[in-house]
Amino acid sequence: MKKILIVDDQKGIRMLLDEIFTSEGVKTYLASNGKEALKILEETKMDGVLLDMKLPGMDGKEVLKKMKALYSDMPVFMMTAYDEGEMRVQENSCHADYYFPKPFNVHELKNTVLELLEKRL
């Protein structure tokens, strides 16, 4: 069973993504901030992470850097409300595997994440 970590400070987004991926047979873990996410990753190796760019405390870039230090080959999908220009700057400074602008198309996000996870397994 594939395992993904969903990290977003908005409970509604966490619950929506949890429902979508659980219905696809994916085991989900949820975190509302970077500290929680890193604790979960220390305890459980994930097949992938959906990570919000703007989080309380540690921002998504800092969390991503620490995640990649733990598991360099783990795919990370950044979710961001930044505009397109800011997103390109973030892409160059972060090493996420894919970026989804908010608001995102739920079906596109689900299909992209599942497709990439299948290729990696």
Image: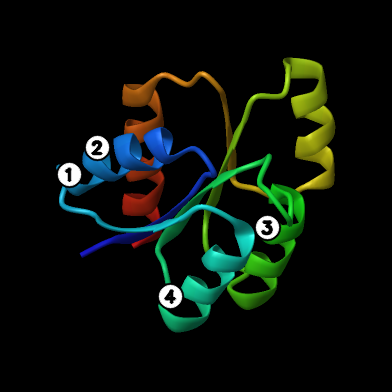
Location of mark 3 (residue): 64
In the figure, 38 relative to 58: above or below? below
The residue positioned 40% from the left and 30% from the top of the image is 109
Q: Position of residue 103 (x, y in %)?
A: 51, 18
- Secondary structure state at the residue bearing disc 2: helix
- Secondary structure state at the residue bearing disc 4: loop
In the picture, residue 101 is in which quadrant? top right
Q: Which residue type carries mark 2?
A: Ile
In the figure, 30 relative to 70: above or below? above
Whether residue 112 sits left or right of residue 107 in the image: it is: right
Q: Earlier in the sequence, mark 4 or mark 2?
A: 2
Is mark 1 in CB contact (under 8 Å) with mark 2? yes
Q: Which residue type carries mark 4?
A: Lys
Q: Residues within 10 Å of mark 3 (few under 14, many from 20)?
A: many
**Disc 1 from disc 4: Cα separation:** 19 Å
The quadrant of the image that shows the N terminus is: bottom left
Q: Position of residue 42 (x, y in %)?
A: 52, 81
The residue positioned 74% from the left and 62% from the top of the image is 65
Q: Which mark is residue 45?
A: 4
